[in-house]
Image (tube, rainbow, N blue to C red):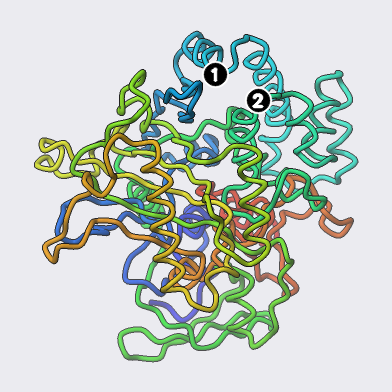
Amino acid sequence: MKSKYDAVILGAGHNGLVAAAYLTRAGLSVLLLEKNDYIGGATTSQKVFPDYDAHLSRYSYLVSLFPEKIIRELGLNLELRRRATGSFTPYVKNGRHDGLLLSNVSEEASCQSMFELTGNHTEFEQMKKFYGLARVFAEEVWDTMLEPLAAKEDFRRRFDVSDQHREAWRSLAEEPLGRAIERYLQNDLVRGLVLTDGKIGVFTHPHDETLLQNRCFLYHLIGNKTGEWKVPVGGMGAVARELEQVARQSGAEMLTRVDLRALEVTGTKKKVEFEVGGETQAVEARFLLVNFGRNVLAKLLGKRHHPDPTDEGSVFKINMLLRRLPKLKATRYAETEAFCGTFHIDEGYEEMNVSYQQALQGRLPDKLPAEVYCHTLTDDSILSPELREKGFHTMTLFGLDTPWRLFAENNETMRQRAEERFVDGLNGWLEEPLQDCLAVARDGSLCLEGKSPVDIEDALGLYHGNIFQDAPSFPFAATREQEGTWGVETEFENVFLCGSSARRGGAVSGIPGHNAAKKVLEEK
């Protein structure tokens, strides 16, 4: 380890690795410092259940926002596999269990399934029109994510080319998302299905005047101009390992088990003091890249963090290992079809209005909206050959309307209560209890791990468990000062955010890592 580097990156999550790869390829000397004993941050895969040889993506699961341009430029060897099913939403109609299955491979199957639910073909056509707005937005926006921020008005002018473009801008960037959902769609289940992409991870509702739901929705729908969420073969750990390998091959140095002690950010040379291996070390760098949240940076600098109310996280995650897939009450569809995509539970439009209001009042909702999916139905390489042969599967649940505030005072009790309520919600659509299908550890416990927003904050430093670090941002400048910037700048010269707390950050995208590297090379 040298005493001086061109750039020091704090945090070796995927964004830090992306930044390191770009900078070292440009000839800069780079040191990454990581507090954990592994590289990859939230994008690692781990043996969550030690008795079984299954490597689960513990905190992040699917990939949509990682630009193909970054994959090409860094020469990453990644396989992102398409899920055959987009989503499955169980329902009861005329006393009979059924489900709405939207296929990624057959529009005809999706159309027929929608007809079975609604009794008409209008709703399916209206849904396509609505998602057409998101596609138009993505076409105009996606390439700009790897460019300096444009002014909002300049952005708006991009949409002055057709009625559909103008409607896309109005519906997604100017008015609360609920208006467009209610304008285009009539069926409560379909409305809820669409709204979920505006709620995952944040605490909001259809008519939120802050447009938090719009920003979150766009976040889920613009990736690589399609918005399709794909399964990383080998789990999320394969993404982290490939990025680590590329960064190391380019010359990046990395240290793990690092305990940061002090930062000097005001001088021309930035100084980092840390402890590793029981020894105190110090390095200097011209550039300091921060791959953790503004909240953690403020704490390290002895300053106050000033979050926005919309920054509160609202997601509950459950990782599971199953001996077999549970049978469905909706016998029209095979379990392998239903759980391959995103399986929606209690996410009707009105149901989520109720659950939001109950959570807003400070209580755990009676019916918790959630969605689950099974990684191993698309990629079973995360399981050992023995587990594959036995028919084991992994399953992941994302819970909505579970804001940090509900768990802040008594996390243990509330986590257990939420786990039970989420499992009950899923069991309502199953022919057999989920508990009967879960793998069992040697100590007799079920292989189910719940993570509340408090747990996520404790483990990853994400402010109030927000999986985006801060509230998602629109892809244009929010203020005049931001116009023409990369969205990574801080109040300190040559100190840049390279992680999810940068503008246009969040998820497994590599976008802020790329943009921070571009900013460094611009200043160099």
Q: Amino acid at mark 2?
A: Asn
Q: In the rendered view, does 321 fall on the left or right side of 10?
A: left
Residue 126: image x %, image y %?
69, 17
Image spot of residue 452 (x, y percent): 47, 64
Q: Nearer the viewer, residue 185 or 299?
A: 185
Residue found at x 30% / y 34%: 431
Q: Quadrant of residue 159?
A: top right
Q: Secondary structure at mark 1?
A: helix
Q: Is residue 504 left or right of residue 155?
A: left
Q: Give the quadrant of residue 419.
A: bottom left
Label 1, label 2: how far apart the Cα atoms are: 9 Å
Q: Is residue 42 left or right of residue 349?
A: left
Secondary structure beneath dot 2 equals loop
Please report the residue visible at 27 percent of the width from the left and 32 percent of the height from the top.
Answer: 327
Q: Residues within 10 Å of mark 1 (few under 14, many from 20)?
A: some
Quadrant of the image for the N terminus? bottom left
Which residue is depicted at the point 35% across and 73% down? 256
Which residue is at the front of the view, 392 or 331?
Answer: 331
Identify the disc placed on residue 87: none
The residue carrying mark 2 is 187
Res. 125 in view: yes
Q: Is residue 388 above or below residue 306?
A: above
Using the image, determine if residue 205 lies above or below residue 255: above
Residue type at mark 1? Leu
Label 2 near label 1: C-beta < 8 Å?
A: yes
Which of the 4 image quadrants contains residue 478? bottom right
Task: Examine the rendered structure and indicate whether residue 190 appears above or below residue 24.
Answer: above
- Residue marked by disc 1: 117
Q: Which mark sits nearer the N-terminus, 1 or 2? A: 1
